[in-house]
Image (tube, rainbow, N blue to C red):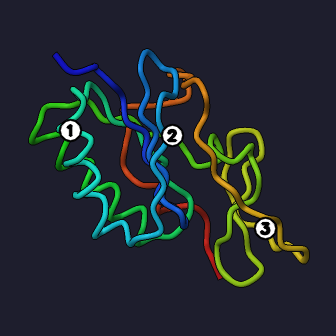
Amino acid sequence: MPKSVELVFITLSSPILIGIYEDAKLIQTIRSDEKSSEILPILFDEISKKYSIKSLFYANGPGSFMAIKIAYIFLKSISILKNIPLYATDAFYFNENQPIKAIGKLYFVKISSEIKTQKLETVPEIRFTLRDVLDYSEFSTTTTPLYGIGAVG
């Protein structure tokens, strides 16, 4: 019988990161520079042939509107079709609460629990990383993308 694992998807920027977790501990990382719309189905198929997938987690924003939308539609569809629970958290969980590019010099920032946009003159390096151990309390069953975050522009 294959190992029962949890999958974490960070598709907000390149490279796409997929973490394979066993009992909340990271056991494998998959990186891809491909477009999420093309590579997510392929990678999911490969992973599901090797493991039994018990839950899905993803960063639901803020970030690239299209990247978030593709990840959400793909993961929500898999969740429904295969009866696998889907959970989400904001992207700040995966980048040590660093600003996330919005548009131009505007960045998304998280202050306390509120996400808003802020103009930054110096451009921070934005790097998303998979956690070694998942903190389930940071995730929610409210999985819709964070589209409605403040005005951008």
Observer-nearest of 140 and 126: 126
The residue tagged 3 is 118
What is the x, y in percent for residue 152? 62, 76
Q: Quadrant of residue 131?
A: top right
Q: Is residue 48 left or right of residue 23?
A: left
Q: Kindly report the distance in space between the C-alpha atoms of the residues bearing marks 2 and 1.
A: 23 Å
Where is 29 relative to 32, above or below?
A: above
Q: Mark 2: few, some, or many residues within 10 Å (few <14, many ≥20)? A: many
N-terminal of the pair, mark 2 or mark 1, is: 1
Query: Looking at the image, is mark 2 or mark 1 nearer the viewer?
Result: 1
Quarter of the figure that contains the C terminus: bottom right
N-terminal of the pair, mark 2 or mark 3, is: 2
What is the x, y in percent for residue 81? 9, 42
The amino acid at mark 3 is Gln
Find the residue positioned furthest to the left: 81
N-terminal of the pair, mark 3 or mark 1, is: 1
Q: Mark 3: few, some, or many residues within 10 Å (few <14, many ≥20)? A: some
Query: Looking at the image, is mark 3 or mark 1 nearer the viewer?
Result: 1
The residue tagged 2 is 89
Where is 4 relative to 94, above or below?
A: above
Q: Residue at x 55, y 65 (%)?
A: 13
The amino acid at mark 1 is Ser
Q: Kindly report the distance in space between the C-alpha atoms of the residues bearing marks 2 and 3.
A: 21 Å
